[in-house]
Image: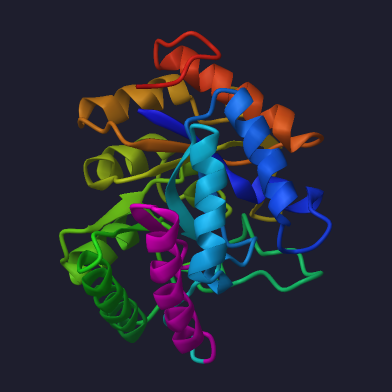
């Protein structure tokens, strides 16, 4: 397995929403020095608006530092929303272009409803906006139809898709995510079992993270990892979540890694930022922890 840095963690350290060439060089320098193998470029940086030349320069910066760009992650891309679905579909089509220019093999898609600026998203409640519990048959069929088109377009370019387990979205449980994959029925589409996203979707999770991972691991083609701690308040039927570093939350990644290895998964593991304070230190600590679980010495690259 190889370990990638999820670039969403760096967004607050840029002077503008789109990092300059020098800012990209600086962060890639740091990522390389810390022993990461690659970078997951998140659309918290509007990568789908890059042209081929700009994407080529970003790819060159990564390559010069010994880094790969295995995936681009597209957040808040619900495909069944009446006013957002078509625009998100078109954005994902542009993301396929960008992934090709960057040399990425996977476009990761979170089918969640985008966060409204200034509004705290609903998590840990009895219901979830955009979630699978209240979804209709049409929601599932329209989502699968659009993802199938994207998969076919991606397959012609040698690209794979991954559907991320995510709260506030249609794929917020393992069963709903697998239903979507089965309805798409294309060989280049897999799952991203981002366990904490499913864990925080409702006040009382419909499944444990172990149950979700056992179901999704055989279909996984990329794996986002992070950690949180759940605190449940039964008097209001609501849960709150405290973000933690990778080795300190409710998900035991030592056990999770055993589940993934048992299915033969040997792909990219992307560490996302969960915690408080310095995101770079949090992700660096997470890389060292994960490397130790992969039986590698901290500071060495994964092969």
Residue plotted at (49% across, 36% down):
67
Residue plotted at (81% across, 69% down):
118
In the image: residue 146, left or right of residue 226? left
In this view, the residue in front, 215 or 107, is 107
Identify the image's colour scheme: rainbow, by chain, secondary structure or one colour. rainbow
Residue at the extreme bottom of the image, as rendered = 83
Q: Quadrant of the N terminus?
A: top left
User: Can you say whether 216 is above or below 156 in the image?
Assistant: above
User: Can you say whether 212 is above or below 255 in the image?
Assistant: below
In the image: residue 303, left or right of residue 296? left
Residue plotted at (62% across, 24% down):
33
Residue plotted at (28% across, 37% down):
214
Residues rendered magenta in the picture? 83-111
User: Can you say whether 3 is above or below 194 in the image?
Assistant: above
Q: Is residue 168 visible?
A: no
User: Can you say whether 140 is above or below 56 in the image?
Assistant: below
x, y (%) of residue 58? 56, 53
In this view, the residue in front, 170 or 108, is 108
x, y (%) of residue 219? 23, 47
Task: Determine the main secondary structure of the stretch shown in magenta.
Answer: helix
Q: Is residue 103 visible?
A: yes
């Amino acid at each position: 397995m190889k370990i990638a840095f999820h670039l969403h963690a760096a967004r607050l350290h840029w002077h503008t929403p789109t990092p300059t060439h020098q800012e990209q060089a600086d962060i890639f320098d740091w990522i390389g020095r810390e022993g990461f193998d690659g970078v997951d470029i998140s659309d918290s940086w509007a990568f789908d608006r890059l042209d081929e030349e700009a994407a080529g320069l970003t790819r060159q910066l990564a390559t010069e530092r010994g880094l790969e760009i295995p995936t681009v992650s597209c957040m808040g891309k619900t495909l069944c929303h009446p006013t957002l679905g078509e625009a998100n579909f078109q954005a994902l089509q542009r993301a396929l272009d960008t992934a090709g220019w960057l040399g990425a093999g996977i476009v990761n898609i979170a089918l969640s409803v985008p966060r409204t600026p200034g509004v705290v998203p609903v998590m840990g409640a009895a219901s979830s906006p955009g979630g699978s519990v209240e979804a209709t048959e049409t929601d599932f069929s329209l989502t699968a139809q659009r993802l199938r088109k994207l998969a076919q377009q991606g397959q012609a370019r040698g690209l794979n898709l991954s559907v991320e387990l995510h709260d506030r979205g249609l794929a917020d449980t393992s069963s709903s995510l697998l239903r979507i994959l089965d309805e798409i029925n294309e060989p280049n589409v897999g799952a991203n079992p981002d366990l904490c996203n499913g864990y925080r979707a409702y006040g009382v999770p419909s499944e444990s993270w172990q149950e979700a991972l056992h179901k999704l691991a055989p279909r996984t083609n990329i794996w986002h990892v992070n950690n949180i701690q759940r605190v449940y308040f039964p008097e209001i039927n609501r849960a709150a979540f405290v973000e933690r570093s990778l080795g300190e939350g409710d998900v035991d990644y030592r056990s999770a890694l055993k589940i993934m290895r048992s299915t033969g998964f040997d792909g990219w593991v992307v560490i996302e930022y969960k915690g408080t304070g310095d995101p770079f230190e949090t992700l660096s600590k997470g890389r060292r922890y994960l490397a130790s679980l992969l039986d590698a010495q901290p500071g060495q690259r994964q092969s």
